[in-house]
Image: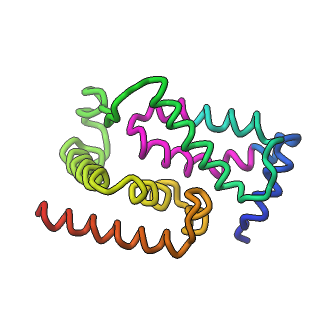
Amino acid sequence: MEKDTNYYNQLAKRASNDDVAFIELYETFFKRVYNFIYAKIRNAADADEVVNDVFYKVFMNLEQYSGTSPFTAWLFSTANHSVIDYYRKKNKKRQIITEDWEEFFNESIPEFEQPENKLLTKEEIRQLLDAIGKLNEREQEIIKLKYWADCSNVEISEILNLTPSNVGIILFRALDKLRKIFVMNE
């Protein structure tokens, strides 16, 4: 049975006094929050730190969660503010994580992890991230929430204070822009 927004809203209310409920929230949303933050920071170690900060803030402030808005909107709003705080504190430019040379050239790694295959994947990812960087901020946010954080259009609309149909239109136009960017680069 798929759990709905109301289920997570109720679970979040219980989680302020129930560790098991908080663990369920953490396990359910960790990957989505991590992907969302990693897409913005592009550094695994820093993303880990920010994700920890997000869930710490959520845990410490669950009593303030009213339940009037969806928990996912509250959670991703907290994540977004934590990323802003990260950039304020660190005053860093975004950077792509680099790997150790030893791991990169390890002969015992599987074929899909071999250097030439990893380079292809890394190059494709770099091209995609560069193309996304050419979109405006709202389009970038929607793409990141949709594909990295795996949010629905309704969840995105609540996080960004838009209508779901507006999210769909912006997403459609952003994807069309990305297609045109890739056609121009071929």
Q: In this view, does 160 lie above or below 21?
A: below
Q: Where is residue 6 in the image (x, y as percent from the top left)?
A: 78, 64
On screen, residue 131 versus residue 74, left or right, reads left
Q: Does the magenta stretch include residue 43?
A: yes
Which quarter of the figure has residue 107? top left
Which quarter of the figure has residue 51? top right
Q: In which quarter of the image is the N terminus?
A: bottom right
Q: Where is residue 146 in the image (x, y as percent from the top left)?
A: 48, 61
Work out whether residue 130 or residue 106 is closer to the camera in this orientation and state it: 130
**What's the magenta region?**
23-50
Q: Where is residue 92 in the image (x, y as percent from the top left)?
A: 37, 27
Q: Is residue 164 magenta?
A: no
State the residue at coordinates (86%, 42%): 18
On screen, residue 184 versus residue 153, left or right, reads left
Q: In this view, does 30 lie above or below 60?
A: below
Work out whether residue 48 or residue 85 is closer to the camera in this orientation and state it: 85
Q: In which quarter of the image is the C terminus?
A: bottom left
State the residue at coordinates (13%, 60%): 185
Total numbered labels? 0
State the residue at coordinates (81%, 47%): 21
Q: Position of residue 138 (x, y in %)?
A: 43, 57
Which quarter of the figure has residue 147? bottom left
State the residue at coordinates (52%, 76%): 165
Work out whether residue 78 or residue 31 is closer to the camera in this orientation and state it: 78
Work out whether residue 118 or residue 86 is closer to the camera in this orientation and state it: 86
Q: Is residue 76 above or below residue 177?
A: above
On screen, residue 143 versus residue 154, left or right, reads left
